[in-house]
Image (cartoon, helix red, strand yellow):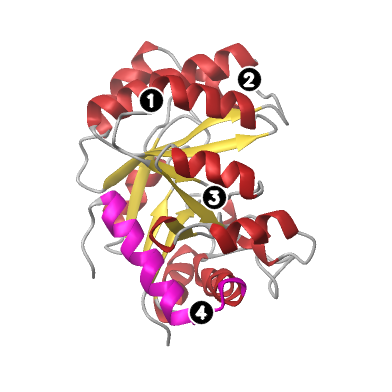
Amino acid sequence: MPAKLIDSHCHLDSEQFNDDREAVVERALAAGVERMVAIGSGDGPPDLEAGVRLADRYPSIYATIGVHPHDAAKADGETYRRLGKLAKHAKVVAIGEIGLDYHYDHSPRDVQRDVFVEQMRIARNSRKPIVIHTRSAWEDTITLLREHWSGSGLGGIMHCFSEGPREAEQALALGFHISFAGIVTFPKALGIQEAARIVPADRLLIETDAPYLAPVPKRGKRNEPAFVVETARKVAELRGVTLEEIAECTAANFRNLSGITPQ
């Protein structure tokens, strides 16, 4: 078994896990995954506790809270008040996933931007890092981060990083960690793979984004936290180090960012 791993981003509240969630968690633990971070965006407001409910139930699970850009149009003043309160929960480690998604445009872009900025304010007040979702919106995302997050000293995570080395350098300059998901194992993901080579070891994270984007050789299946081992293996190969080294450094990085202690 490799050194203990942390899946820094998974959607264990998904209905795809309704029939075997307990077994999914057990398989992850058996594979060496010591912690899983349940992303709390769920189906959007008014439910803000999708991750917290799982964190309360399972010792190995921590949570985030936040409004995904898809659901930005559902947010209102009450949403923000409740997020501020939930941020005090002992197992809430970050605000996210938040950001911009211009690929699907499920919420108007100006609304996405406003909700993103407001959640950065909540994160600053709560002294929590942020978890960023950005799709087809890199330049606007970086601009808003420079305007509203740079200098906070709180850091954050570029979740499921799907850009190249230039964008990785921009995120690193803003103090972010870069989290690689199963896409890095895809043969044609050359830009992402190059980014995985150049990210400093102390800013590197791994994730599944389960149930989405299962890594090779599980591609096409429902993803689950146990499969983060495959992503770690690929990142190790790209960087010319051992799986154990990637497991150790990515777990340590997440603990340092979030303040959680080793199991």
Q: Up-down: is 169 above or below 208?
A: above
Please give the label number shown on residue 120. 1
Main secondary-structure element of the magenta-colored stretch = helix
Mark 3 or 4: in front is 4
Q: Up-down: is 226 above or below 115?
A: below
Magenta-drawn segment: 238-258
**Could you tell me which residue is drawn at 66 percent across and 46 percent down?**
163
Q: Amino acid at mark 4?
A: Val
Please give the label number shown on residue 157. none
Look at the numbered disc 4 and give the secondary structure of its residue.
loop
Q: Nearer the viewer, residue 58 or 208?
A: 208
Q: Amino acid at mark 2?
A: Ser
Q: Amino acid at mark 3?
A: Ser
User: Label 3, label 4: how many angstroms apart (C-alpha)?
Assistant: 34 Å
Q: Report x, y in % for residue 197.
A: 58, 64
Look at the numbered disc 1 and give the secondary structure of its residue.
helix
Specify the quadrant that holds the N terminus.
bottom left
User: Label 2, label 3: how many angstroms apart (C-alpha)?
Assistant: 21 Å
Does 243 lie within the magenta span? yes
Mark 2 or 4: in front is 4
Q: Earlier in the sequence, mark 2 or mark 3?
A: 3
**Could you tell me which residue is drawn at 51 percent across and 66 percent down?**
20
Look at the numbered disc 2 and give the secondary structure of its residue.
loop
**Could you tell me which residue is drawn at 31 percent across and 61 percent down?**
58
Q: Nearer the viewer, residue 13 or 200?
A: 200
Q: Residue under circle 3?
A: 14
**Marks 2,1: beta carbons within 8 A:** no
User: Label 3, label 1: how many angstroms apart (C-alpha)?
Assistant: 25 Å
Q: Earlier in the sequence, mark 1 or mark 4?
A: 1
Q: Residue under circle 2?
A: 107
